[in-house]
Image (cartoon, helix red, strand yellow):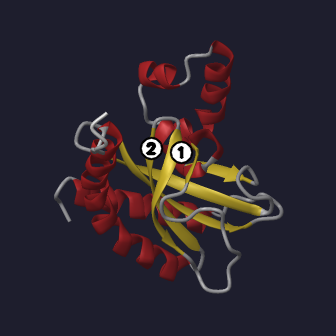
Amino acid sequence: EEKRFGLGPNSYALASSYTRQQPLTRLGAPLIAKLVDTVGESGHLAVLHGTDVLYLVEERARNRPSLITDVGVRLPAIKTASGRAMLAVLPPAQLRALFPDSKEYANVKRTLEPARHLGFAAENGDVTAGLASVAACAVDHAGWPAAAVAVTYPSPSGEIRAELTDAVISTSTELRRRIHGQG
């Protein structure tokens, strides 16, 4: 009626998400760059946003295939190694709240079992055919998933490469140390 426009609640959500994610980006970007230089594959830093992952840092390795992921892209968490790594550390009640449908919850729990046991998550061809990813979660002070570190690589056979798994676990451990103010 007054022919005026104002900022609504979505503006606040956008601004507050920036203030939560900017420190992770600042802490994680150099670690992802070092990871990519070390392993020669593309690396990512993502956060959990509901049932999606949101990519905050994307570092492309030379002569590697282009990826669907990029800064600001959201994908279903359960499809990605990053999402699986973060979902796997959530308490069962929180996981149930995110996936209230009984059948979907059972499928999610089954998908996350390997990550819960191994301490890292993997996916092969679930995001892009012929590419696989491994990821590890860095938790915050309260033990909640703060972010996941991942590497994506060509894998027509679906193999999980141990050197990549070790590298993402090491990088996520360093990110956790920095989040806790120990780095």
Whether 111 is drawn above or below 135: the answer is above
Q: Is residue 61 visible?
A: yes
Q: Position of residue 178 (x, y in %)?
A: 24, 61
Q: Residue furthest bottom?
A: 62
Residue name at image x 53 percent, y 42 percent? 52
Whether 127 is drawn above or below 83: the answer is below
Q: Is residue 100 left or right of residue 160?
A: left
Q: Is residue 32 left or right of residue 164?
A: left
Quadrant of residue 132 within the rendered picture? bottom right
Q: Position of residue 160 (x, y in %)?
A: 68, 58
Q: Between marks 2 and 1, how big is the CA–CA gap?
A: 7 Å
Q: Position of residue 131 (x, y in %)?
A: 73, 63
Q: Amino acid at mark 2?
A: Leu
Q: Amino acid at mark 1?
A: Gly
Circle 2/circle 1 CB separation < 8 Å: yes
The crowding category of the residue bearing disc 2, from other C-alpha atoms within 10 Å (few below 14, some 14 to 19, many at least 20), is many
As helix, strand or loop, the secondary structure at mark 2 comes to strand
Q: Residue furthest left?
A: 181
The crowding category of the residue bearing disc 1, from other C-alpha atoms within 10 Å (few below 14, some 14 to 19, many at least 20), is many
Residue name at image x 49 percent, y 66 percent? 167
Query: Dividing the image into 4 quarters, which one contains the C terminus?
Result: bottom left
**Of callouts 2 and 1, the N-terminal one:** 2
Residue name at image x 65 percent, y 20 percent? 106
Q: Which mark is residue 83?
A: 1
Whether 71 is drawn above or below 107: the answer is below
Query: Dividing the image into 4 quarters, which one contains the N terminus?
Result: top left
Residue that carries the numbered disc 2 in the rendered image: 48
Q: Is residue 178 left or right of residue 84?
A: left
